[in-house]
Amino acid sequence: MATIFTIPIEPSGSITCTTPQEKVYLLTFISPPDNRLRTNFCNSLLLALDIIEHSHPKGVVVTTSGIPKFYSNGLDLEHATTTPGFWDQVLYPLWRRLLTYPMPTVALINGHAFAGGLMLSMFHDYRVQNPAKGFLCLNELEFGSPLKPPMASIFREKLPYPATYRNMVLEARRFTAQNALKEGIIDGLGGLDEALQLINQRNLIGKSKSASYRSLKQEMYRETIGYLDGHQESEERSAGIDFAEGRMAELERERIRGWGRVSGSKAMI
């Protein structure tokens, strides 16, 4: 495969663009140890997408990892919560770019895709997963992190079954490739050859010739785009909900105390 360009991911990674087939652009990212979504990673991937769109013929973009164990292990939460502008200037622009990219995009999931790594794949149009290793998992439940509105809405808009979404969010279920295909999370099993087969069978290379390709995506996913663009409003609404729930919890505890006074029971609250 011919190498078109390479972009560094500081401090020790890179994204390499190759062409396994004419007008198919394979972006292979390596950001040790597990392709966490930090600022440098996101900005390098954004630059790669810009270069392909504005400097090369339209076709299909495939992303994958050069680290065999991981497609991406998600956000670096410490980095995300302590880096000014990370959400609105780095992560959300990357997700929006992928969601509305004027060419078909395929996530070739070679290994584990957890939390933000799974989200990254969901912002692509199609997903092909390694059938031999790796899980898909939305494990915020396990480390006590909420789902921000764009994080939740992308699954609501793309998963075909509500029960799959429930099991993914409220059970942190780990999906093998075979189960992910059955549940409609992914579109195919395999590696690069199978991803190319999917591209050719669906004639994806020709889809981006249409002038309406980007606008069709924008309308399809307007809920998620609205949350990405209106992130500040969403954050304020979430803060208001948290405050209201805090007040409700105090009322609930007061009801328990009142019941205890009347019944003589000593409820633990």
Image (spheres, rainbow, N blue to C red):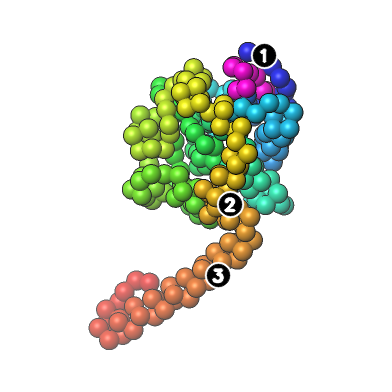
| Front: mark 2 or 3 | 2
Comes first in the chain, label 1 or label 3: 1
- Residue 262 visible in the current orientation: yes
Question: What amino acid is labelled 2 in the image?
Answer: Ile
Asked if residue 60 lies left or right of residue 174, the reply is right
- Residue density around tag 2, few if under 14, some if 14–19, many if 20 or more, within 10 Å: many
Give the Cα separation between the discs numbered 2 and 3: 22 Å
Give the Cα separation between the discs numbered 1 and 3: 52 Å
User: For the N terminus, which image quadrant?
Assistant: top right
Give the Cα separation between the discs numbered 2 and 1: 35 Å
Q: Kindly identify the residue that appears in the image at 30 percent across and 76 percent down.
A: 266
Q: Looking at the picture, tell me which residue is in the foreground, 30 or 227.
A: 227
* Main SS, magenta residues: strand
Q: Kindly identify the residue that appears in the image at 69 percent across and 16 percent down.
A: 3
Question: What amino acid is labelled 1 in the image?
Answer: Ala
Residue 106 spot, x, y in % from top left: 53, 31
User: For the C terminus, which image quadrant?
Assistant: bottom left
- Residue 78 visible in the current orientation: no
- Residue density around tag 3, few if under 14, some if 14–19, many if 20 or more, within 10 Å: few
Q: How many marks?
A: 3
Comes first in the chain, label 2 or label 1: 1
Label 2: state its secondary structure. helix
Magenta region: which residues?
Answer: 16-24
Q: Is residue 211 magenta?
A: no
Q: Which residue is mark 2?
A: 225
Q: Kindly identify the residue that appears in the image at 73 percent across and 22 percent down.
A: 5
- Residue density around tag 1, few if under 14, some if 14–19, many if 20 or more, within 10 Å: few
